[in-house]
Image (tube, coloured by chain):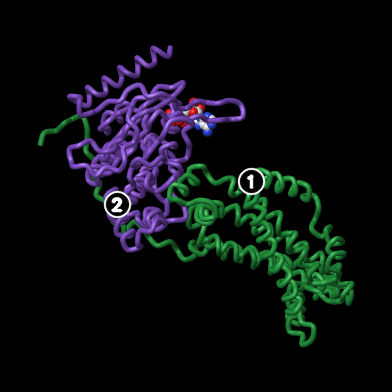
Chain colours: A purple, B green
Amino acid sequence: MAGAFHAGTSEPQGIVTQPLLQVQGATIVYETDLARVVAVWRASFDVQRGERLMVLGRSGCGKSTLLKAIGGYLKPSEGVIALEGVPITAPGPDRMVVWQDTDQLLPWKTVRQNVMYPMLLNGVPRAEAHARAQDFIAMVDLERAADHYPHQLSGGMKMRVAVARGLAMRPAILLMDEPFAALDALTRGRLQDELVRLQEETGATVLFVTHDIAEAARLGTRVIVMSPHPGQIKANLDVSRFASREDLAATISGIISDVDEVAA
Amino acid sequence: MNDPGHYIIEDVPPPDLTDTVKPISPLLRLWHNAVFRRMLVILVVALAWEFGARYADSPLLFPTLLDTLAALKDSLNAPYDSLWGYIGESLKSLSLGFVLGTLVASFLTIFAVNTRIGEDFLSTITSAFAPLPAVAIFPLSLMWFGISQESVVFITTWATIFPVAVAVFQGFRGVSQTLRFVGRNFGLKGLSLTARALIPAALPSIMTGLRSGVSNSFRALVALEMVIGAATGAGGLGWFVMSQKQNLEIPAVWAGILCIMVIGLLFEGLFILFERYTIRRWGMLH
Ligand SMILES: Nc1ncnc2c1ncn2[C@@H]1O[C@H](COP(=O)(O)OP(=O)(O)OP(=O)(O)O)[C@@H](O)[C@H]1O
Ligand SMILES: [Mg+2]
């Protein structure tokens, strides 16, 4: 853990290789006219390839801040965030983001054009972008809406387009900020299953922010629990070590009530 | 099968779409057509004019629509000094001013969006000039450019700049943080972010700005032509109206005014057409 970043590894299989994403002692501060808000305090964790890392915590504990820093929208005032060993300095399509808002699609482009656009901007040939968009639109079950404009879609459909757009770009990591929070429970359940299936099919790496214990326990391969004031990482749970998802959820609940007690 | 007793499963057959989706009647479809409805409005106003003028029965002060149209036709067909020439003159000053004004407004806006001092500059300047009609700048442009087309274009440019700059700036500011983040996520920044994300996202405000830019500019132009024409004996539509009044060609005066209104309507028509294929189709205008 304490080691610095390894250089690009070409070691044989079986030997621990460099994690995809490394967050080491990252502190993120908002400087406003009135005050300095420490939103994230010395966060450290790694994300391995193919993981579904859940970042869990109650409102205001710095989850979105952490995600924006990984996305390259905020700069840590201390510590380093590095992707494949290279410190992150700016937003980029290797870290596609699915935001919480439903207005993250470009209203002037159809579903298909929305999915293709980031690929076209980043040098994917048109024919290939078209084929990839076709595949991912089918995977999120939106073929019938492919030529519709975003305003003609429901909230859940827009979310699926955003997921398809993110995955079709084949980013190093897909960052998702409470993507299903605004949806009804029935739709959310379906999209959660869909996400797990898509992630397993594509082998994508996903960092998923949520405030919902059940969602974290249901989706994660690893769960990070954060506490507020200042935003800190309190626990890092490897899901494979738990006998069942229920077990995991119970443990997370325990950690959260401990955190609350300390705060009280 | 056993009867659960606690619930009933409804089994309504799916709708036969060929049956339920009846084509709407042609009359109703016509009513849904905005262009048709506006034509209807114009027709009602035209009828009111025609019969109002007949009732007033004072051809010199208030000619009927038919007399006005006849005068319009004569003026357009006049072999010498036809109305077309005046229209062309006005449209030339207007479009030159509109293009130049929009360019200047774009620079002001880019400056205002990207720097704090630019924002201060734009909002201070616009507040300072807001109470001043564009024609009021005319004495200055007269000193700088003399009695010339440059003077007129200077005014139409001036009249375009501020309405456009203010609306476009407000439009850019109104683009959501999420959409900006999305654009940057795709690797866009600076001018490419502006061109590919901010401008389309701000298009509703940009359209509003262009509209008020054109009409502000056109208003100033007509008023100005009335003044400057008297000095030079030449000019656009404003001068046509003014000179016909001096010749006591009253139906021709009305024909000139009618012409100005029609041009205004045509501009509006162009904007509506453009909107139909852009922001209305994208659901950005309700
Ligand atoms: N732009 C900002 N300027 C100043 N402070 C901010 C800003 N954004 C967030 N904060 C502060 O940082 C802290 C963390 O905010 P953040 O949005 O990361 O929380 P979160 O965990 O995502 O919460 P939620 O679950 O409600 O989305 C909060 O205390 C918030 O007040
Ligand atoms: Mg948040």
Amino acid carrying label 2: it is: Phe
Of all chains, the one bearing label 2 is A
Q: Quadrant of residue A180?
A: top left
Residue at the image position 51 percent from the left and 52 percent from the top: B193
What residue does disc 1 label?
A: B115
Judge whether A259 appears above or below B37 on screen. above
Q: Amino acid at mark 1?
A: Thr
Note whether B105 is above or below A218 in the view shown.
below
On residue A136, which mark appears? 2
Instruction: Tell me the crowding category of disc 2: few under 14, some 14 to 19, or many 20 or more residues within 10 angstroms, Cα based.
Output: many
> Which is nearer the eye, B276 or A240?
A240
Q: Position of residue A77 (x, y in %)?
A: 49, 31
Q: Which mark is residue B257?
A: none
Work out whether residue A235 or residue A6 is closer to the camera in this orientation and state it: A6
As drawn, A228 above or below A115 = above
Q: Regarding mark 1 in the picture, which secondary structure is present there?
A: loop
